[in-house]
Image (cartoon, rainbow, N blue to C red):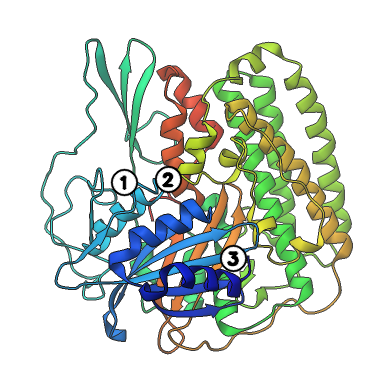
Amino acid sequence: MIVDQLLIKLTEVFAQDIYTAGAENANELYLEVNPEKILEISSYIHLELGYPLILMFANDEQSLKTGYAIYYVFADRTEGLLLIIKTLVDSGKMEILSLSKNIPSASLYEREINDLFGIVPVGHPEAKRLVFHGNWPDGEYPLRKEFDVRHKPVFAKKETDFTKVGGEGVFEVPVGPVHAGIIEPGHFRFSVAGEPIINLEAQLYYVHKGIEKLCEGQSIERCLYVSERISGDETFANSLAYCQAIEKIARVRIPDRAQHTRVVFAELERLTSHLGDLAGICLDAAYGFATFQFRMMRGWAYGAADELCGMRFLRSVNKLGGVRKDFAAGKEAKLREQLQKIRSELEDTVNIIKANSLFIDRVENTGILETKIASDLNAVGPGGRASGLRFDVRKSFPYEVYNQLEFNIPEHHNGDINCRMNTKIEECFESISLMLQALETMPDGNVLEAINSVEPYRFAFGLTEAPRGENIHWVMTGENNTIYRYKIRTPSFCNWPALCHAVKGNIVPDFPLINKSFNLSYAGNDL
């Protein structure tokens, strides 16, 4: 449904409650609506039109004379359209109507807004703290513009409120936040009856860094470097989404050669990430041979990255308006050789592990994420696709030159570890194919269209398909080429709740394996 048709349809139903309407950046439709009708309007968009809620955030717009605003972002993934509903908050009440009962994916967003802005979601079934658990003081809301980043809050010890599961023989198993492995901190509270897991509650944000606050008032160039450091293994996907948003605001079209180059790096990051995930699954299933096969291939992929840009984690590759230099020039033949080597080894390894009945028995029907739950929570990336949610930003919202290249989206429906593993295996082959296609069709020419300035108070979305899935960055510019508001939603934010559902009915020793099959980012969640 195109923008005009959608606007006509919504106006027919909610004529009195739509205050303003306007299209931005070709595929973004913004509507400001009556806040008292937000539950009705959102439920209609979600349930009747079938648009998932993919993002929700607040913005302190007091300096713009509009007060506090809430943005609800819905997606038409068939037409490649974003529908953004905006409501204003009564500064005397600082409340919004909760959508969580009708739209489960709204729950974490509303809790996040409550913590960071002090805007209370009225009617939320469980509006406890999300970001600031433990010792964060009451009445301190860091994403309000009035909050000074130099201010040091007075911390006070508080008990964390976990969900209690009652019943005879039910007990709790706390795990973390400090773990035996070299991973970031996260606390997992299991409620079990005997061996089966009844409930799992994950408490994250131990490494919350205040990235969105850090970017306020900073230059657009400086914030590019921040975007690269959100999550170490999704460096390129995050910086690319940020660049897309700024390039839309500046109305700049980047050169074709830069677009092809970005595809090569985006797929190289995906390949490297997936090979690491596959190694992790095999390691937690005690399958040593396959573990080291995937780790070896990942090392080869890192070698290709180092050859191209001198940086395994692909930092300082993207630049506003394109890429920093012509990284592929003169290296095409060597990269093709390395990719074909990985593909050949991957084919052999996959054939071996799929013939191992003991290993397949371990991953089949373990950690099932049901399709309905995946849909309700807006599970994204391989975690969602393994449960039948067959969408991909590269197809739904094509960027760079993906619409000129041929690739398939894996289709799986059982939602278990085996399906998530197979999804990533198939995506590895597709990534290799995409890189080879991009190298084959890459034209000559420049790789950078300089961006020297941007208009203040314009805004745009950047969307990429990160290795873990749909990745969304919304940028609103300020005066003098600075950032007014930078909202980031990585795929891990959507998939952590999905993981908690996938473990139910399994036993606690299955958790590391199920967890590894999603392989979510702590840093990418704990912004």
Q: Which residue is mark 1?
A: 206
Q: Position of residue 495 (x, y in %)?
A: 47, 42
Q: Of callouts 3 and 2, which one flags the residue occurring earlier in the amino acid sequence?
A: 3
Note whether residue 245 is visible: yes
Q: Is residue 242 above or below residue 361?
A: below
Q: Residues within 10 Å of mark 3 (few under 14, many from 20)?
A: many
Secondary structure at numbered mark 2: loop
What amino acid is found at the position of numbered circle 3 in the picture?
Leu
Q: Which residue is mark 2?
A: 522
Q: Residues within 10 Å of mark 1 (few under 14, many from 20)?
A: some
The CA span between labels 3 and 2 is: 29 Å
Judge from the rendering whether residue 252 lies leftward or rightward of residue 31; answer left or right: right
What amino acid is found at the position of numbered circle 1 in the picture?
Tyr
Secondary structure at numbered mark 3: strand
Quarter of the image with the N terminus is: bottom right
The CA span between labels 2 and 1 is: 9 Å
What amino acid is found at the position of numbered circle 2 in the picture?
Tyr
- In front: label 1 or label 3: 3
Q: Residue at x 58, y 27 (%)?
A: 417
Judge from the rendering whether residue 305 lies leftward or rightward of residue 182; answer left or right: right
Q: Which mark is residue 53?
A: none
Q: Position of residue 262 (x, y in %)?
A: 70, 64
Q: Which residue is mark 3?
A: 81
Secondary structure at numbered mark 1: loop
